[in-house]
Structures are given as structure tokens and as C-alpha cells.
Image: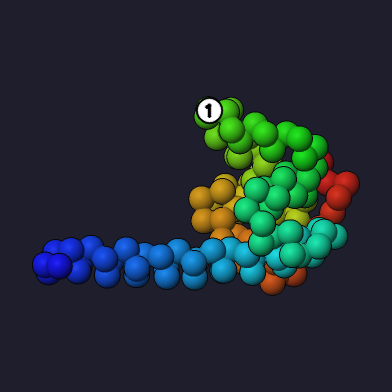
Amino acid sequence: MDVSEQFVALMQGGLGVVSVAWYILVVIAMWKVFTKAGYAGILAIIPIVNIIFLVKIAGYSGWLSLLYIVPIIGFIFNIMVCLRVGMKFGKSTAFSVFLIWIFSTIGFFIIGFGQAKYDRNAQ
């Protein structure tokens, strides 16, 4: 094995560790958001299930999470879900766009560990 192959193997292993660490951070943040919304926090661990329950937290039917499969509609629906999640926790549109849609992990940490309260009836 030459030096370039060793470097590639090292980089792939390092990226795997970083990816797992990032996923753990996302799960911790979403766990707190789910428990504030009245759902079991353990649902944040399961990849597709966490999206379904995030859609339910936004006030939509869980079946609408299938819209994420459709390319352009999924992108637009993701923005709608982020805006509604922010609204349900009493956050502004700017907060929802920047910290739930663009920097979602930071936004979920702020909502989960902050003073935000979930209001199921917020429109």
C-alpha cells in the first residue's frame, strides 16, 4: 500500500468518525425538541422516523413526510416544516429560516435546551 492509499484510508476513517459524532449531536438536539413537543425522545435516533415526527411537530400529518421524496416539492416542504416548527415554539421567521432550516442542529439545540415552549395550537 503506497502513501496515497494510506492517506485516502485515513481520511475515510476520519470522516466516518466526524459523521458519527455529528449525528450524535443531531440526535441529542432533536431528542430534547421531541420531548418538549410531547413525543418520546428516543424517536430522534431512528433516521426516517425522526423526520415523520418532526413533520407531526410542525402540525402536519405524518403521511406528508412522503413529500420529502419528491425533489422540488420536498425542498419547498422542508422550508414549510421548518417555519412551522419555529412558529410552534414561538420563534420568528428569521430564526426559523437561519437556525432551523440552514443551521438545523444549532436551532434544535436552542429550542431544545432553551426557554421555548411548544404550543400545539399555534398557527
* Residue nearest the observer in this picture, 58 or 6: 6
Q: Is residue 88 among what the camera can see?
A: yes
Q: Mark 1 falls on what kind of element?
A: helix
Q: Is residue 67 left or right of residue 15?
A: right
Residue 32 placed where, x, y %? 72, 67
In the figure, 75 relative to 122: above or below?
above
Q: Is 2 on the left-hand or right-hand side of 22?
A: left
* Residue wearing tag 1: 72
Q: Quadrant of residue 43?
A: bottom right
**Outermost residue, front direction?**
1
- Quick check: can you spot residue 111? no
Q: Residues within 10 Å of mark 1 (few under 14, many from 20)?
A: few
How many marks do you count on the picture? 1
Between 115 and 102, the one lying in front of the other is 102
Seen from this angle, which residue lies furthest right? 121
**Which quadrant is the C terminus positioned in?**
top right
Q: Position of residue 93 (x, y in %)?
A: 64, 46
Quadrant in the picture for residue 36: bottom right
Looking at the rendering, in which quadrant would you find the N terminus?
bottom left
What residue appears at the point 49 percent right and 67 percent down from the top-left corner?
Answer: 20
Instruction: Tell me: residue 120, above or below residue 20.
Output: above
Given the image, on which type of amino acid does mark 1 rest?
A: Ile
Residue visible at 84% across and 54% down in the picture: 119
**Residue at (57% x, 28% y) in the render:** 70
Q: Identify which residue is drawn at 81% across, 62% down.
A: 40
Image quadrant where residue 74 sits: top right
As drawn, which residue projects farthest toward the left?
2
The colour scheme applied to this rendered structure is rainbow
Residue 54 image position (x, y, % from top left): 71, 49
